[in-house]
Amino acid sequence: MRKFAAHYIITGTGKVLTKGVITLTDQGVIVDITDTNGDLEESAGVEFYSGVITPGFVNAHCHLELSHLGNAFPENSGLAAFLKNVAENRYADENRMVDEARKADAELWRNGTVAVGDVSNTNKTFGIKSKSKIIYHTFIEALGFSPQRAEKAFALARQCFEEANELELIASIVPHAPYSISKELFDKITDFAAGNSSILSMHSQESAAEDDLFRSGNGDIFQHLSENLKLDLSDFQPTGNSALKSVIGWLPEKNNLLLVHNIQTTLKDIDLIGQTRSLDRTWFVICPGSNLFIENLLPDIDLFRKKKLQICLGTDSLSSNRKLSILEEMKTLQIHFPAIPLSELVIWATRNGAEALAMDSWAGTIEIGKRPGINLITGMDLQELRLKPESKVKRLI
């Protein structure tokens, strides 16, 4: 047994303990939580830390297989230019890809991450994830904007899905984004997801250029598809609506859905989602570091909070971020949205992600019976309970 105490324990349930004590087995299972109401007496065997204890972090959106693209692209180039860079550079020497992905997995672990929703377009990182200390949910993305490619694209994704199963990885087949999936491919993904009750993830409203494509059939994304990828867009007909409105009805209503990025998401979009599916089964994943890197914009977090949306945090990949650290994402949000209390940021960084990935039976909150991992955040303003630029995270369990 180990006993931990700190100035504060933010449990992820909404409760904050002052100088509380948590008792865990050697396997990291929580067996007791003591609320001392701030009156902690010296006790043999209790390890007291200066700082804040939280559950292990859940990174709801990452691309481990793009780790070799760290520091490769310019910032603030816009989504279309970023997609062009990824398309031209994503395939490298396999040994290098695997080596950098392995380093990224170790970085995630060092930074207090216990679970990840990770996007894969190939099987290159499957071996790493199957042996990792982190629990991954692998979102196998299907890509195919041309209706003629739907059959082949889904077959490739299905092959990756079966390989993941052989390695006992948790996996789903998911759409990449509205601008990269035909209705025919969406139908195949939806049928498969509904039949397997699987979790879905989709890049959504990451740029105004997505809406330009669907509303009028032009803009930067249209040019990327036609000029950079040389796709035949003769079958595509603009809907006159936003990208999200054009495709949200194609996704199964009852499956968990993670919508990722959401920079352009408005009140009208939120109302649309609520009319189309249950918001209780919908999570809004924000990746602040990546959003600022690519588009130099952030989602309307104040609106999301007002509408009580289920917010999760992600890092995206090293191709669009400097670090794979959920704590750094929390710092960024605190700078831009100083009214958000730390206890709420911790819920976004832990519980919500665990629930979205259906890992909340063991992760996401400090509760008896769970083994969520235990992080210690140091270098904080403990009087105001706020992060500072020099705040760091240390894994205790």
Image (cartoon, helix red, strand yellow):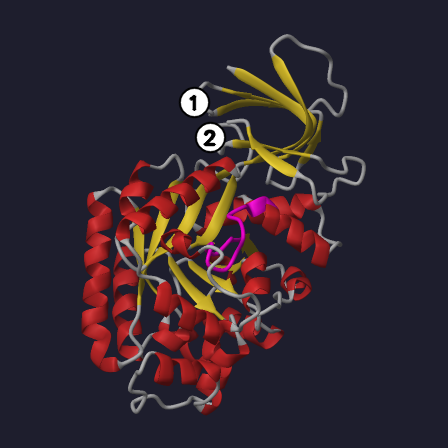
368 or 26: which is nearer to us? 26
Residue at image position (47%, 82%) is 220
Q: Where 238 sits versus 247, above or below?
A: below
Q: Amino acid at mark 2?
A: Arg
Disc 1: which residue: 27
The question of residue 323 being in magenta is answered with: yes
The question of residue 142 being in magenta is answered with: no
Q: Amino acid at mark 1?
A: Gln
Residue 396 pos. (x, y %): 54, 27
265 or 110: which is nearer to us? 110
Residue at image position (37%, 47%) is 101
Q: Is residue 207 left or right of residue 145?
A: right
Residue 65 pos. (x, y %): 36, 53
Let me know if residue 242 appears in the view: no
Do the CB atoms of the residues marked 2 and 1 lie less than 8 Å apart?
yes
Q: Where 325 sits versus 69, above or below?
A: above
Location of residue 105 (image quadrant): top left
Task: Specify start and end residues of the magenta stretch as a single range.
Answer: 313-327
Disc 2: which residue: 371
